[in-house]
């Protein structure tokens, strides 16, 4: 299952960006040629992220289309299907560009735990009585 290799790459990038803080979500752009699904990547990510800052985090997957140029008619198009045919003439002789990228767009940190104490009192309250 090639999703595990992709999930490991995502986890490495998440851990670098998180800098030790807990992560709740990661948004990833994956090219159509990688042939991954959100369900598949989340299953793999859940498995490999156990014990890490991203344990129990969800990966939001955005599929980036591949750009295709037909060698027969010269038509250009994009598709999220990795094995698409020319939209203009239906030929399968297309040149594909891109669609193999993997980019960590953003991460969402887990909310910080409540720290005991009165934060207003701790910071001082300049408007209140002394």
Image (cartoon, rainbow, N blue to C red):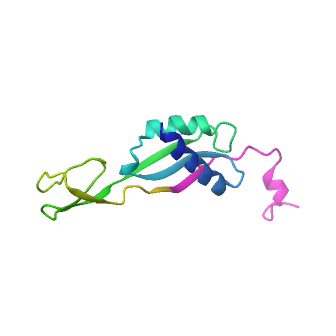
The x and y percentages for residue 42 are: 51, 38
Q: Which residue corresponds to the image point at 85% horizontal and 60% vertical from the top-left?
A: 129
Q: Nearer the viewer, residue 65 or 115?
A: 65
Q: How many marks?
A: 0
Q: Which residue corresponds to the image point at 48% horizontal and 41% vertical from the top-left?
A: 2
| First to last magenta residue range | 104-130
36 displayed left or right of 82: right
Q: Which residue corresponds to the image point at 13% horizontal and 61% vertical from the top-left?
A: 72
83 displayed left or right of 127: left
The verdict on residue 33 being magenta is no
The x and y percentages for residue 111 are: 66, 46
**66 relative to 38, above or below:** below
Q: Nearer the viewer, residue 99 or 104?
A: 99
The verdict on residue 125 being magenta is yes
**67 relative to 35, above or below:** below
What quarter of the picture does the C terminus occupy? Answer: bottom right
The x and y percentages for residue 120 are: 79, 55
The x and y percentages for residue 104 are: 52, 55
């Amino acid at each position: 299952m090639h999703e595990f290799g992709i999930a490991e790459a995502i986890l490495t990038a998440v851990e670098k960006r998180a800098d030790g803080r807990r992560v709740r979500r990661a948004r990833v752009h994956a090219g159509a040629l990688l042939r991954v699904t959100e369900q598949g990547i989340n299953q793999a990510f859940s498995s490999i992220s156990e014990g890490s800052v991203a344990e129990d985090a969800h990966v939001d997957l955005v599929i980036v289309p591949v750009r295709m140029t037909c060698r027969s008619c010269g038509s250009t198009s994009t598709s999220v299907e990795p094995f698409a045919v020319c939209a203009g003439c239906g030929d399968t002789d297309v040149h594909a560009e891109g669609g193999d990228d993997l980019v960590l767009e953003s991460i969402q940190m887990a909310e910080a735990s409540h720290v005991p104490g009165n934060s207003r009192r701790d910071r001082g309250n300049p408007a209140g009585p002394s």
